Image: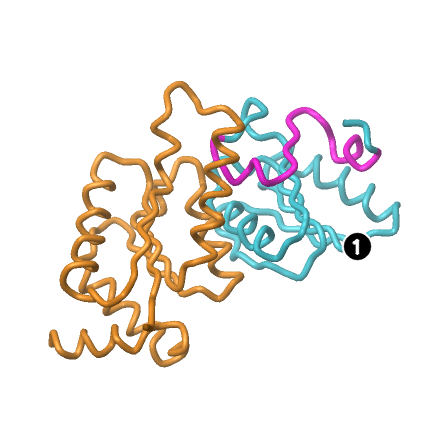
Amino acid sequence: MTYFLSVPATTDGMLWLVTAKEYVEKTGGKTVFDIRNGKTKLFIPEFDVLCVYKPDTRHEVWFMVGVALARGVQVYIFDPVNGFSKNPYATLCHTFHTLTLLDVMNGNM
Amino acid sequence: MVTCNIYLAGPYTSDTMEYLNSLATKFQNTIISSVRINVVSTWHYQEVVPQPDKQTLYKAALAGIEELAKADIIAVYQPEKSTSGAIFVEMGIAHARGIPTVYSIGKKWSADEILQSIIDRFWLANSRLISPNIALLLLEDD
């Protein structure tokens, strides 16, 4: 399984990415990651699962979510503002406010 | 009968509804009257005050997916003003499915400009996606 992890270039984004990457690789999965700073050119590789961290105000990340939904792969959204996104399409994804990727992968939801 | 479904969308701003409705009317009544048009607002769920609940949003998302499945072309007005990001999800879905997308940033394109853009960008590369009637009607207008 290839996990595509997309995070903003912030301290908490990097911390989340490190945790997620370590966990996925420990469990035998592969990761492709994307650190977005507002100037990063968008790329959308082949993947089995898309995990996006704090997508709420980042349009290009929502674009990737659309691509993933169209491909029929699973999408996980972490830490939407107040645990809720007003983007209706977020309801088609798995959304988590306070849980870490580790919690989710362990089934502790 | 050849049909072409155009999905029109815009952010929930004061002028969007009027603008997109005027485009739809023009498409339907003058330029491509032989073509079936779907006009879909992606902002309607944002009119619910206070914040819509998850079930309302879920229904809106399914409706959007259903309409996108019928679309041959999507035309998006000022996507950068989208506050929810919903338009960008739709653009991503369209991209993945190979549906041509025309979008305007910061300006109101006329119906003619949108159609011309469709022809310029997509006619040669994706002729199968566009009704021959559109090109024919544009040529007649010229």
Pick the quarter of the image with the N terminus of chain B: bottom left
Residue B7 location, x and y as percent? 35, 55
**Residue at the spot x=67%, y=38% of the render?**
A14
Direction from residue B109 to residue A7 in the image, left or right:
right
Direction from residue B42 to residue A55 in the image, left or right:
right
Q: Chain under label 1?
A: A
Residue B55 against residue A43 in the figure, above or below? above
- Return the residue nearer the eye: A46 or B22: B22
Direction from residue A94 to residue B3 in the image, left or right:
left
Pick the quarter of the image with the C terminus of chain B: bottom left
Residue B23 against residue B115 in the figure, above or below? above
**Residue at the spot x=63%, y=50% of the render?**
A34
Residue B36 location, x and y as percent? 29, 61
Residue type of the residue flagged with mark 1: Met
Q: Which chain is cyan?
A: A
Q: Which residue is mark 1?
A: A1
Residue B95 against residue B83 in the figure, above or below? below
User: SS for tag 1?
Assistant: loop
Residue B141 location, x and y as percent? 11, 74
Q: Dividing the picture into quarters, in which one does residue A8 lie? A: top right
In the rendered structure, the colour chosen for chain B is: orange
**Residue at the spot x=57%, y=35% of the render?**
A91
Which segment is the magenta one? A86-106
Residue A26 location, x and y as percent? 88, 45
Residue A2 against residue A13 in the figure, above or below? below
